[in-house]
Amino acid sequence: MEYGGTGGSGGGGGADPNDASDPQRRKKRYHRHTANQIQRLEDIFKECPHPDEKTRLQLSRDLGLAPRQIKFWFQNRRTQMKAQHERADNCALRTENDKIRCENIAIREALKNVICPSCGGPPVNEDSYFDEQKLRIENMQLKEELDKVSSIAAKYIGRPISQLPPVQPIHLSSLDLSMSSFIGHGPSSLDLDLDLLPGSSSAMPSLAYATLNLSDMDKSLMADVAGNAMEELIRLVQTNEPLWMKSSSIDGRDVLNFDNYDQVFPRTNSHLKNPNVRIEASRDSGVVIMNGLALVDVFMDANKWQEFFPTIVSKARTLEVISSGVMGSRTSSTLQLMYEELQVLSPLVPTRQFYFLRFCQQIEQGSWAIVDVSYDIAQENQYSSTSCKVHRLPSGCLILDMPNGYSKVTWVEHVEVEEKGLIHRLYRDLIHSGLAFGAERWVGTLQRVCERYACLMVNSNPSHDLGGVIPSPQGKRSMMKLAQRMVRNFCTSVNPSNGHQWSTISGLNEFEVRATLQKSTDPGQPNGVVISAATTIWLPIPPQHVFNFFRDERTRPQWDVLSNQNPVQEVAHIANGSHSGNCISVLRAYNTSQNNMLILQESCIDSSGALVVYSPVDVPVINIAMSGEDPTYIPLLPSGFTISPDGRQLNAEAASCSSSSNASTIGGGRSGGSLITVVFQILVSSLPSAKMSPESVNTVNNLIGSTVHQIKTALNCTTS
């Protein structure tokens, strides 16, 4: 019989019965291995716990041990390792068992102190929650919720809830975003500084419905709706005929073929129930001076989105982030539930309000698609429109990176509109033509705003600052921030987003004056009660001519009643874009009693319309901005004009004349007349309790009436 030593680190060896001196007593004689033998055996054991016979014979010769000693050493070593592992497992299980026992005791103690949430008394028994009646009630509630979600699913995606996919990260195709997609788009490639935009960190007033309780089922449904919308948008962007046709009119715009569209994208019915629902569909494209990643960042941030398009977006909020993309990036696979209000800068046109899903997907390297599609949420809200219901069908844009920091943007707008009231006669043609809220307006505005930010990054002094009024690039930057805030405040005053409504204070034969009274408490505005008054008139003059008339300081005394017909001189000029009319000016009026007052003015123009906005500013205050200091708290109360085409179609001969006279910048030569909205803001009182008094009404009426009369006289339109 053979005996093996322990073989462990203690160095026990094997016993050979042939070496026993007394066979009757069979006394065992143990042989302890040397340290070198044990070390060699341990090394082999680590590499191969089960050596074959050839290895054992080799070890026997090398170590001077019998083959059986080698064999028994390995057997004992394996047994020892198994015992060690079992002891470790037992210790871990014992610790876990003790932990569970302590938790069990704590739960039992807590159950002794449970009270009924209804009556405050002790529970009837520990299993009352699992009462059969309560389970039946919960079952009924869950069934009702399932039926509700099923009906919504059938409405949006045309198939029952049982076919919905499980909740999972959104992947539309094999071209989904990977980390390699960021190669070449590092910080160095984002060559436009957008810090004029407040971004997501800005303090914005929250809506009453800002917190939504979305279930996994809701998110799965939203993902499915967004995925289908993305597929439709990409086809609308990339396909020409038969989905899109060129308009037969002089403008040659892309027009959606509704018959072919319905065949390609069949729908059960309109989302709006009125049979008189009107459909607006448009597509346009253009090259902008901003790279794709920077554009995506603007579009996916609600605050930057509103700041980027102040003339179109009067309010924007992100209600819920459904999917945040790869590593929290907004540049791809990001799905958001949002709310926005879109405007035409006139009190005669109500805002359009949307709850919608915005989904961003990187299609391939340097190419992104962003789709918007309306999504009804089952909550009543105080911002629901009373004069216009709209439903956004898949709309959005395709962004394609180009060399030198440029991008090509192709935009699609597609909405169903149900007018609950009559459209004002002045804007009927513009709205029905689709130009008021169409893709051309979005692209034209985007091109102009991107040029503005590109000019902001040029580190040079203004090209025309008489006498070095603006001494440094920091001063230029500060002045541009101040002017941007002025324009934003002006657009907000035309369509207040704080619930204030316009009231008609004068219904003269020529035009109608509307006004609203609101408390001004925001930083950068005079504290007190401000009256905003506006009117819109039509003039049979091309918009470009009207814009030139308003922005030229030489013709300003002809319409500015506050200057008392005194001459005005431009003392500083900052270019904002390639068009000479896109600029910021500082004006000084001569021969007036207020020598310490200057006028800050910004004018801008694109294919969809124009703005001329101005505000009086004290000389010491504007010196703060010109020196490069923070202009956030400089008080501004802007007034000005908005100019847009009237939307009426010209015949070919008139369009040719209009084009040859360089009057086709706005409206692309389509419009023969202009719609001009005159807006004034006046500080009524520094007391927050002030009301709209008859004196205030008369002052506003006289101011607007005199201004309109002088405009018509100067432009020879007294009979219009």
Image: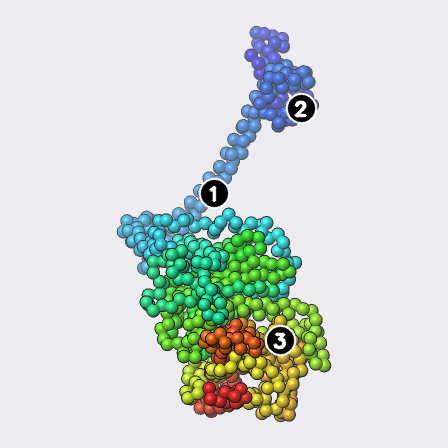
Q: Amino acid at mark 3?
A: Ser
Badge 2 crowding class, 10 Å Cα cut-off, few under 14, some 14 to 19, many 20 or more, is few
Q: CA gap, disc 1 to disc 2?
A: 43 Å
Q: CA gap, disc 2 to disc 3?
A: 89 Å
Q: Amino acid at mark 1?
A: Lys
Badge 3 crowding class, 10 Å Cα cut-off, few under 14, some 14 to 19, many 20 or more, is few
Closer to the chain start, of discs 1 and 3, is 1
| Residue 410 position within the rendered picture, expressed as x and y whole percent measured from the top left | 52, 62
The residue shown at (36%, 73%) is 420
Q: Quadrant of residue 600?
A: bottom right
Closer to the chain start, of discs 2 and 3, is 2
The residue shown at (31%, 53%) is 143
Secondary element type, mark 3 = loop
The residue shown at (55%, 80%) is 545
| Residue 461 position within the rendered picture, expressed as x and y whole percent measured from the top left | 70, 73
**Disc 3 designates what residue?**
580
Secondary element type, mark 1 = helix
Which label lies toward us, 1 or 3? 3
**Disc 2 designates what residue?**
40
Q: Is residue 355 visible?
A: no
Closer to the chain start, of discs 1 and 2, is 2
Q: Is residue 309 visible?
A: yes
Q: Amino acid at mark 2?
A: Arg
Q: Quadrant of the N terminus?
A: top right
Q: CA gap, disc 1 to disc 3?
A: 77 Å
**Disc 1 designates what residue?**
99
